[in-house]
Amino acid sequence: MRRTQSGLASTVARKPALRVHSPLAKALSLCSVLSILVLAAAPLQAETSAPEAGYAIESPKAVHSLLLDVVNTGERLVAVGDRGHVLYSDDQGQSWQQAKVPTRQMLTSLFFVDAQHGWVVGHDAQILATTDGGKTWTKQFEDLEREAPLLDIWFKDLETGYAVGAYGALLETTDGGANWEDVSDRLDNEDAYHLNAITAVKDTGLFIVGELGGMFRSRDWGQTWEAVEDKPYEGSLFGALGTDEAGTLLVYGLRGHLFRSTDFGDSWQQISLNTPNNGPLEFGLADGTLLRDGSVAVVGHGGTVLRSTDHGQSFSLINRPDRLSLAGVTALDNGNLILVGQGGVHLAASTGADLGQQ
């Protein structure tokens, strides 16, 4: 794996999209999978009303456009994606409304600390915030000179949060996002490899994963960091997820690689993922979530949906028949799943299968 450049997307978009196990859906502008997903996204209809300058264009087709992350706040579903789209649903995903958002840049990840307060990150190193459950958003931060996206965000409470992104970006706020400070020098990341995901590990600390298998951990919740030297994999890792067991986390990335640690990254076990009748999983894994019942869901390219009910020790696996790449997942109150990615929002059974076909 070699490093990519932020200007690559405009070049690869003219090439045929042949590799379905390309890198991270969330790092789209940094790798060739951007052309795969954007070209497959449904075209937008003309806006329903004249948009304000700099605001996302409202469209009835936004629910079918490329979406990269989705969360269940406890009171509402919120999804984000291409062209500054933020969608929300108050009826368990049956219908969606488009939020008022002051950007048209791609949004990559979001995080809510409670039902009302959330943050989203995206291209141009933008960070947006909401205080009304995702209906309206304000821009807290952007850095056009970075020419690179932020890829994930995590908040400890209403005041303290961290965002990570391309070229080793690590930003911190201690005042709810009123001010953001670049604290990238806290990491031993001299070559500025991309940071793809940040997660909390129960009763232990924070964990970051990124390019070339890079791993960093903080036992004091972000103030100091150490590089994990004994890495289980040299390929890019696109996601990290703490389970409901103390010190236990999962990391995952290219070509179906998924690893589990029960000691905050001191040691690792590779989890075997086999497709029905087709051998080992070869599709990249993009995102995962810890559900309220303690189970784990992970999604990726080729319509891959993984489920675990034993804290990540083993997984069931399906590849959805449409093979659309998936970039985000959350659960509904009844245990069914909301999947997002190519083609927008997909309602699915708890296994990831189409409703009625599980």
Image (cartoon, rainbow, N blue to C red):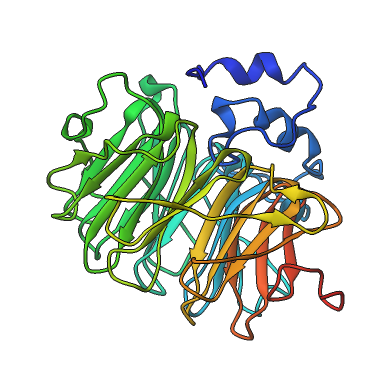
Along the viewing direction, whichever of 269 and 75 lies nearer the viewer: 269
- 90 relative to 197 in the view: left or right: right
Say how many tags the image has: 0
Coordinates of residue 78 in the picture (x, y in percent)? 55, 64
Tell which residue pokes out farthest to the bottom in this image: 334
* Residue 134 in sight from this viewpoint: yes
Q: Is residue 5 above or below residue 218?
A: above
Quadrant in the rendering for residue 230: top left
- 2 relative to 272 in the view: left or right: left
Q: Is residue 354 above or below residue 79?
A: below
Which quadrant holds the C terminus?
Answer: bottom right
Which residue is located at x 27 percent, y 59 percent?
Answer: 263
Quadrant in the rendering for residue 57: top right
Coordinates of residue 310 in the picture (x, y in percent)? 50, 75
- 286 relative to 141 in the view: left or right: right
Which residue is located at x 77 percent, y 16 percent?
Answer: 14
Q: Is residue 159 above or below residue 2?
A: below
Along the viewing direction, whichever of 229 and 148 lies nearer the viewer: 229
Coordinates of residue 300 in the picture (x, y in percent)? 64, 49
Which residue is located at x 45 percent, y 31 percent?
Answer: 234
Along the viewing direction, whichever of 318 and 230 lies nearer the viewer: 230
* Residue 48 in sight from this viewpoint: no
Coordinates of residue 192 in the picture (x, y in percent)? 32, 23
Which residue is located at x 41 percent, y 74 percent?
Answer: 115
Quadrant in the rendering for residue 125: top left
